[in-house]
Image (cartoon, grey):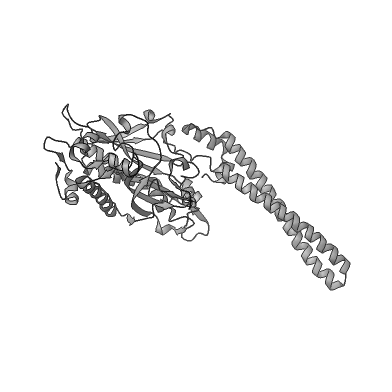
């Protein structure tokens, strides 16, 4: 969430920047400032009462020593009255704190200066593209037909076991999935990321820390008996490792990665764009996370973008990198790059990764700070994460783009992981 200092000192700037995200922040910002003023006035009143209580307590001792028992008794009565008033103010302060936080977390993160205005995906800016789209024959099959033909993923069995959007991977399909996970993890390790295998259920504090709660609770699977949530991405548990942590500046950047299954309740509309592997409720993903010094977080972002670009290049997939416009950005992001790969048989671009800098927005929720060497004041870190990569649409593109009359060719970089070069 945004810091109160920023909102107090730059009210108009905050409101103007959030217009880029098509968000009218003025009512919320003014409500936050109003609550903040009331809270500070109440705190000042409470502090004054406490000071008066301390003063009278000292006077009681002096009165007792002087033998003025009546005066001491009168002072005690006054102290009791002040304590009751202090208790009332403490309750008021706690209520104002809760109301202030409730309103504050409704304000999105400010977009970076490079973010363009826009309503949606059609207004995103193409940064660059690479790879060569393969020319497929007219009778080329989309991946959902290839899956049936070669028996490598079973959607009907997934519906029997769980429901729509929970596929069962079989044989070479399962091995391809595992190969991609191991490839992504090995490449991440080469890039300096420490592998983390985190829990796939988190508590409410973790969901709040990275901004999924209270913004996206409707998209998360909720284990109501324990008030746990199935993770939508490894970003949540891996970033929350640093909740309530103070790092030293020399420890930055912290680079972690994690493979997890991911769970999202979002219901898809009907149509080819959500068929097969295009949209699932459960899917595999390797996530990279960095905790960075504020002065170097955009260097870290570019490094992460280069890392993801290297992965899609090595898989020999045609791709493009899009910088999201304000209207297509997430609630928490300051700047996001999306990676899309070309799906040859569907003849459309599929999003396979989002790489984002959240600046101090998540860190303020997490209370994740760092201390510069020789300085006493702690500062908020910057947090970043990215998909490296999400598997379903990568698998879809590999299957479609590499289909031949003999079978589906496995990208060369994966053969040492799969143990075979073709699905036939």
Q: Is residue 232 left or right of residue 348?
A: right
Residue 30 appears in the figure: yes
Q: Is residue 296 visible?
A: no
Q: Identify which residue, 155 or 405, lies in the foreground.
A: 155
Front one among 168 and 388:
168
Q: Position of residue 93 (x, y in %)?
A: 66, 50
Residue 144, given in percent of the width and then of the height, sits at 24, 35
Residue 291: percent from left, percent from top: 41, 52
Q: Is residue 35 left or right of residue 374?
A: right
Instruction: Examine the rendered structure and indicate whether residue 151 appears above or below residue 52.
Output: above
Q: Residue furthest left?
A: 406
* Direction from residue 29 to residue 17 in the image, left or right: left
Residue projecting furthest to the top:
138
- Residue at the location (15% across, 28% down)? 137
Based on the displayed image, in which of its 4 quarters is residue 283 positioned?
Answer: top left
Count of picture labels: 0
Q: State which quarter of the image contains the C terminus.
A: top left
Image coordinates of residue 233 in percent, x first then y, are: 38, 47
Q: Quadrant of residue 85?
A: bottom right
Which residue in the rendered view is the most extreme toward the front? 160
The residue positioned 57% from the left and 44% from the top of the image is: 102
């Amino acid at each position: 969430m945004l810091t109160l200092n920023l909102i107090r000192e730059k009210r108009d700037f905050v409101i103007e920047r959030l217009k880029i995200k098509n968000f009218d922040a003025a009512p919320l910002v003014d409500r936050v400032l109003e609550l903040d003023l009331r809270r500070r006035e109440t705190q000042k009143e409470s502090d004054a009462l406490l000071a008066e209580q301390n003063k009278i307590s000292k006077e009681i001792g002096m009165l007792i020593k002087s033998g003025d028992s009546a005066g001491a008794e009168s002072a005690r009565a006054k102290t009791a009255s002040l304590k009751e008033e202090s208790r009332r103010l403490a309750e008021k302060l706690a209520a104002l704190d809760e109301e202030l936080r409730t309103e504050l977390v409704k304000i999105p993160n400010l977009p970076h200066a490079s973010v363009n205005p826009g309503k949606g995906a059609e207004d995103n800016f193409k940064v660059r593209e690479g790879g060569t789209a393969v020319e497929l024959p007219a009778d080329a099959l989309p991946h959902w037909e290839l899956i049936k033909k070669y028996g490598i993923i079973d959607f009907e069995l997934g519906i029997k076991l769980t429901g729509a959007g929970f596929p069962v991977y079989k044989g070479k399909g399962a091995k391809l999935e595992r190969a991609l996970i191991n490839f992504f993890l090995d490449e991440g390790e080469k890039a300096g990321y420490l592998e983390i295998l985190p829990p796939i259920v988190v508590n409410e504090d973790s969901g709040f820390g990275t901004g999924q709660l209270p913004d996206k609770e409707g998209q998360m699977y909720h284990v109501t008996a324990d008030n746990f949530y199935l993770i939508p991405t490894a970003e949540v548990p891996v970033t929350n490792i640093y909740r309530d942590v103070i790092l030293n500046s020399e420890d930055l950047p912290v680079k972690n990665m994690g493979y997890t299954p991911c769970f999202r309740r979002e219901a898809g509309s009907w149509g080819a764009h959500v068929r097969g592997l295009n949209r699932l409720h459960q899917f595999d993903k390797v996530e990279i996370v960095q905790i960075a010094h504020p002065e170097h977080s955009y260097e870290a972002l570019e490094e992460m973008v280069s890392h993801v670009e290297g992965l899609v290049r090595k898989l020999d997939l045609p791709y493009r990198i899009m910088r999201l416009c304000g209207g297509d950005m997430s609630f928490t992001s300051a700047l996001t790059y999306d990676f899309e790969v070309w799906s040859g048989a569907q003849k459309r671009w599929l999003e396979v990764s989002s790489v984002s800098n959240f600046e101090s927005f998540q860190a303020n929720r997490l209370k994740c700070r760092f201390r510069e060497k020789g300085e006493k004041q702690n500062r908020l870190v910057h947090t970043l994460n990215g998909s490296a990569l999400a598997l379903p649409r990568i698998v879809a593109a590999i299957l479609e783009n590499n289909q031949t009359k003999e079978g589906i060719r496995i990208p060369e970089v994966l053969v040492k992981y799969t143990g075979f070069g073709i699905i036939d």
